[in-house]
Structures are given as structure tokens and as C-alpha cells.
Amino acid sequence: MAKIDLKSATGLSIIYENDALIFKNSSFQKKKDFTIDDIREQLLNKELDCPEIFYKKYYSVDTDSLFSSKKIKLHIYTISPNLAGIEFVKTKVTRCKKYPRLIEILSGTAIILLQQYKSPKENRVIKFLAKKGQKIIIPANYDFVAVNPRQNSSLIFAEILYINAVSRVVLDDNSGMAYYVIRKNAKQEIVRNPNYKIVNEVEKVEMDKIIKEFGITPKTTVIKQLIRKYEKFNWLFKEDSVKY
């Protein structure tokens, strides 16, 4: 697999090679490989035994305490191309109850699903197709999953949040989100999770307009913007500050 230089995407000297991130002049607190057993409860087909590794998460990436001094956490995820049966590989569903989160695609293409399910009558599922450089704001109390829909390229993305924000794995009891992203007859499809008897249709939201409303420049990596224009990101540190 080709080497990917992530410096222009992150502002940090990070290289992706041989399915791993190599850090120069920066570091991370810990790394976790999320295996099929970690994610099994959220799969369409729970009887599978491969792929062994679904994704890798590098926690609290930093350089000379630059981000921690700004009260920011930066996590980086890598998802190699693969299929779990007919389902595209994905992350576990997470939810940050009080604070918004920022996602930026560093390499590859992602399908991002957001969900808020309060009841059969009150629920939302939002889908984004995001390519390198695109940013997505996740409101507080929304479930989030990232899917790698490409079979020939890895997905690498950053998750940025307030240092006091707590992101927890959720929806094991529901077998994950209300919809799964699958490959059927060489095409990509979204199918409903049968554990959700009633759920609304998937929405599409124009994120480019939303990020501009929150002071984000589309073409500059959001990590650089956070450092240079810190005051524009006050909303990232406030509870329930994002609605759309």
C-alpha cells in the first residue's frame, strides 16, 4: 500500500505506511486496534470471523502540548479497505452527550452516519459522503459512525473535541445504528437495522453551509484553524452549542 504523507492535511509530520501511522515531532498517548470481537455486537452479521482488525485509533495526538494547552483532544483513526461479509468496515458507534465534535477527513473517502433516536416518532438519521479535506460538525448527543466505502484505499480521519468532552461507545444493545452500509451486486446500499421497527428515512444535510456558519474555512485544515483562530471555535467548548 502506498505511503501517505499527512502533513498538509494535519499540519503535523505524520506518515501512513504499512497500515500504521508514523509520528515525527508529535506523539500520542495510546493506540488501540479495534478487532472484530470489539465490534461484533454492532455488525449486520455477528457470525463473521474476519477481518480481524476493523480500525485503529490513536488517542490524544499532540506536539509539545500544543493542543492540550488549548484544551483540545485530537484523535486519529485509520480504517483499511475491507468488507465484513456484505457490510463495509466501520467504527463503533460513539456519542458525546454534552459537547459537539469535529471530524475532518485526512485521506480517503468516508460515509458518515449521524443519528438521534428518541422514539419511533422522534428520530433523525443523517448521511454524509465526505472526501479528503471535508469537515463535519457532530452536535452533542448524536450517535456517530464512520464507514470506509472504498475497497482500494484506507480512510484516515481526525476527531477533535473539548478536552472535558467524554465520547462513549453506545448502541451495542441495538446492534448499532438504524442503518447499515453494505455492498450488494457490486453497488453500495443502505439497509435498515431490523432492531429498529420504525425509523425515519435517511436525511442529507448540506454541511458546507453549516461549517461556514461556525467560522470554519473549507480549504484549510481545521487543526491549523483551531490554533490560528482559536476564538472562532468558542462553540466547541460549550454544551449543546450546535443545532441543525
Image: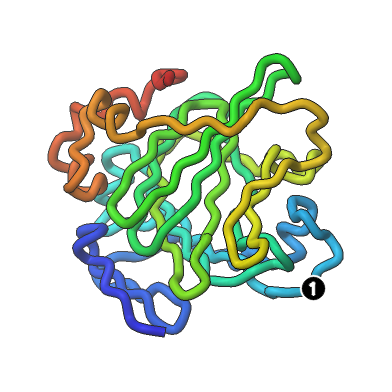
Q: Is residue 206 above or below residue 156?
A: above
The residue nearer to you, when weighing 196 against 100, is: 196
| Residue drawn at (43%, 36%) of the image | 101
Crowding at dot 1, Cα within 10 Å, few <14 / some 14-19 / many 20+, comes out as few
What is the residue that sits farthest to the right in this orientation?
Answer: 47
What is the residue that sits farthest to the left in this orientation?
Answer: 228
* Residue 42: % across, % down: 74, 51
Q: Is residue 182 above or below residue 196?
A: below
* 38 relative position to 99: left or right: right
Which quadrant does the C terminus fall into?
A: top left
Residue, disc 1: 49
* 172 relative position to 165: left or right: right
Quadrant location of residue 52?
A: bottom right
Numbered disc 1: secondary structure: loop
| Residue drawn at (43%, 19%) of the image | 243
* 154 relative position to 191: left or right: left
Q: Amino acid at mark 1?
A: Asp
Q: How many marks?
A: 1
The residue nearer to you, when weighing 57 against 49, is: 49
Which quadrant does the N terminus fall into?
A: bottom left
Quadrant location of residue 214?
A: top left
Q: Is residue 88 above or below residue 73?
A: below
| Residue drawn at (17%, 48%) of the image | 220
| Residue drawn at (24%, 50%) of the image | 66
What is the residue that sits farthest to the front in this orientation?
Answer: 185
* Residue 117: % across, % down: 67, 25
* Residue 16: % across, % down: 37, 75
- Its colouring scheme is rainbow
* Residue 110: % across, % down: 46, 54
